Amino acid sequence: MTLAVLIVAAGRGTRAGGDLPKQWQALAGARVIDHTLARFRALPDVGPICVVLHPDDMGLLGDAVIKAVGSATRDASVRAGLAALAGRGVTRVLVHDAARPCVPLAVIHAVIAALDDGPAAAPAIPVTDALWRGDAGRVTGMQDRVGLYRAQTPQGFHYDALVAAHATHAGGAADDVEVARAAGLDVTIVPGHEDNLKITLPADFARADRILRGAMDIRLGNGFDVHRFCAGDHVWLCGVKVPHTAGLDGHSDADVGLHALADAIYGALAMGDIGRHFPPSDPQWKGAESHIFLRHAADMARDMGFMISNVDCTLICERPKITPHASAMRDAVAAILGIAATRVSVKATTSERLGFTGREEGIAALTTACLVKS
């Protein structure tokens, strides 16, 4: 399964006020659209992300996302985004409003899970207020609220089913649920959330700011580790066995990259370091494979409610050469952490023949981990 995200951001949003369309306005230290993208980039298995933009806005986002040119109507913009995702192996797609930057990750996960049992799903909140009909500023009648919901996004679909539904729709739909239902697709309702507001009016910015500053918990942690060379014919680095003229000395398998990554996660959680959880004085960890330590750190992060947004590892050595193995190392770290390989960076540098790494006495690793809770 390949899950894609389609962000609709081509509108002008004039009711929100300001000199820029609402998705480009500042909010809680970033732009509205930056917060929206961050929510979906925090998903562990997200595939391509496509943002549908107004022609005047194509230069306002970097190349980390697929960009499509939007149209004057929402359904036409979604069709443009679906076309941009064609041929990329997408099986499921989430369609989301750029102006909903506060969507909780729990809502996103509920939509994704519901697609296991049906072709379409969307979050909504039951209407609980009394409903009136009115004209010229006066109440003219009542409206029964039983069975009524306030629709939200992301709205999730099996990709091929949504493409086919749009191909047969006459246009003018309020959202993709309307398009799906017109094509006869069953749409599962999952619980929405009051924080998942759509910025529409000037006052909505203040509310979204309070939600973002109060709800999202972003943690950064650093890790550093060193192991000296010893007799041997290989070293373990970031979960990969690399042939070498020496080994690395350590109580476990001495994987300096995985040790530093574990320390970065423990540090972000304020939970000490690897030695606190796996004391070298404990004989049971003699010769242990280091993926045990990193997976423990990742599991602890999830148990505390955090998602691993990304990790970065720099290996410092003259030899062995890291570049030929970097891709395999990324894949190994991603598998241990349970995140996409696109969220893992493994790179290397030398110390210009200076210090213990320059003298080829050992290898060092410097790492960073970013954890997000919302």
Image: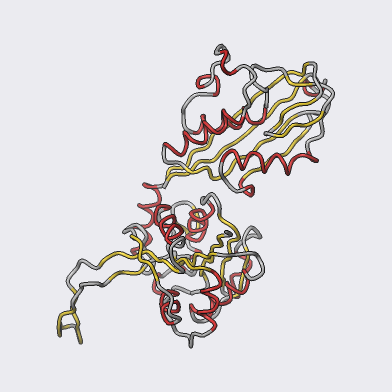
How far from the left and from the top, in percent, is residue 59? 63, 66
Q: Tell me which corner region of the image, top left, top right, bottom left or bottom right, holds residue 15.
A: bottom left
Residue at 43% over, 37% down: 303
Q: Is residue 212 above or below residue 197?
A: above
Q: Nearer the viewer, residue 81 or 243?
A: 243
Residue at 77% over, 34% down: 349
Name the quadrant of the N terminus. Answer: bottom right
Q: Tell me which corner region of the image, top left, top right, bottom left or bottom right, holds residue 241.
A: top right
Q: Nearer the viewer, residue 368 or 11?
A: 368
Q: Residue furthest front?
A: 117
Q: Is residue 74 above or below residue 265?
A: below
Q: Total label count?
A: 0
How far from the left and from the top, in percent, is residue 167? 54, 83
Q: Tell me which corner region of the image, top left, top right, bottom left or bottom right, holds residue 88.
A: bottom right
Q: Is residue 285 above or below residue 152?
A: above
Q: Is residue 289 above or below residue 97?
A: above
258 to the left or right of 32: right
How far from the left and from the top, in percent, is residue 247? 77, 21
95 to the left or right of 357: left
The image's colouring method is secondary structure
How far from the left and from the top, in percent, is residue 362? 76, 21
